[in-house]
Amino acid sequence: MSTSDRPARRPLFLVLEGIDGSGKTTQQQLLADWLRDQGESVTCCRDPGDTPLGQQLREILLHSAGDLHPMSEALLFLAARAELIRQVIRPARERGDWVVCDRFLLSTVVYQGHAAAERIDPNWLWSVGREAAFGLMPDLILLLDLPLEVAIQRSRRQDRFEARGREFQERVRRGFLIEADRQPERIRIVDAEGGPDEVQRRIRDEVERVLERHPRA
């Protein structure tokens, strides 16, 4: 069956999550390439970022020399996300694009809710986060999970969050797994060990699983 003869599929809003070094950037590109090869239109983005305000807040959040309270961090992430939705994600969805985003609200829930020394209630973060996202939630969150030792070896950058040390990163991973256990249908754990193509196959299996439930546009 040619691409033009294939039944139309409902474009999905997909999010890649995981600890730093889990391979989100690589897998985002591979997933977008796979979808485009099938004739789909795809918009890729990262949170925070990809808007003028988002880029400014990204620099503050990831590279500021000063210390920020987790509440300040959370509110800055929510502001950046609101603009990303307004300027990038919502227009893409209105065009009928698939959206593949590097991080979204789950990261705020985990980093500021589960992992921070002065934790914010994760349930409150989900609630206010949905409001700040205009009610828009991903169709599927792909949580790339791997042992911390492997992630540390892979990671090539150092930002404010990575600089908080191993114990913090362990709380981050644990927070992701807790939230995945709470929302098993929306948050799917993907084994991120192995080569990029092997991990990508696991991701595609999860995407296809969702499409089987909602195959047509």
Image: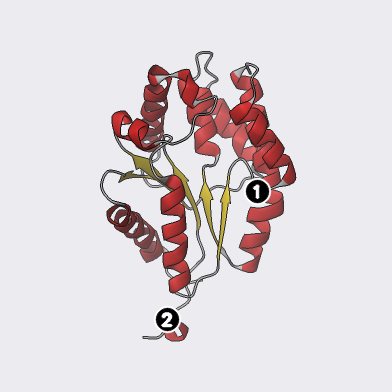
The residue lying at 30 percent from left, 37 percent from top is 146
Query: Looking at the image, which residue is at 42% across and 27% down?
Result: 172
Location of residue 150 by image quarter: top left
Question: What kind of colouring is applied to the model shown?
Answer: secondary structure
Real-space Cα separation, disc 2 to disc 1, in angstroms: 32 Å
Local secondary structure at mark 2: loop
Left or right of 52: which side holds 133? Answer: left
Q: Residue at 28% of width from left, 51% of height from top? A: 195
Looking at the rendered structure, the kind of residue marked 1 is Asp
Q: Where is residue 203 in the image (x, y as percent from the top left)?
A: 35, 54
Query: Residue 50 has which mark?
Result: 1
Q: Nearer the viewer, residue 63 or 130?
A: 63
In this picture, residue 144 sits left or right of residue 83: left
Q: What SS does tag 1 mark?
A: loop
In the displayed structure, would residue 92 be above or below residue 72? below
Q: In which quarter of the image is residue 130?
A: top right
Residue 82 at x, y percent in the picture? 68, 42
Could you tell me residue 135's position as x and y percent?
A: 62, 45
In the rendered view, tell whether residue 182 sits above or below residue 199.
above
Residue of label 2: 6
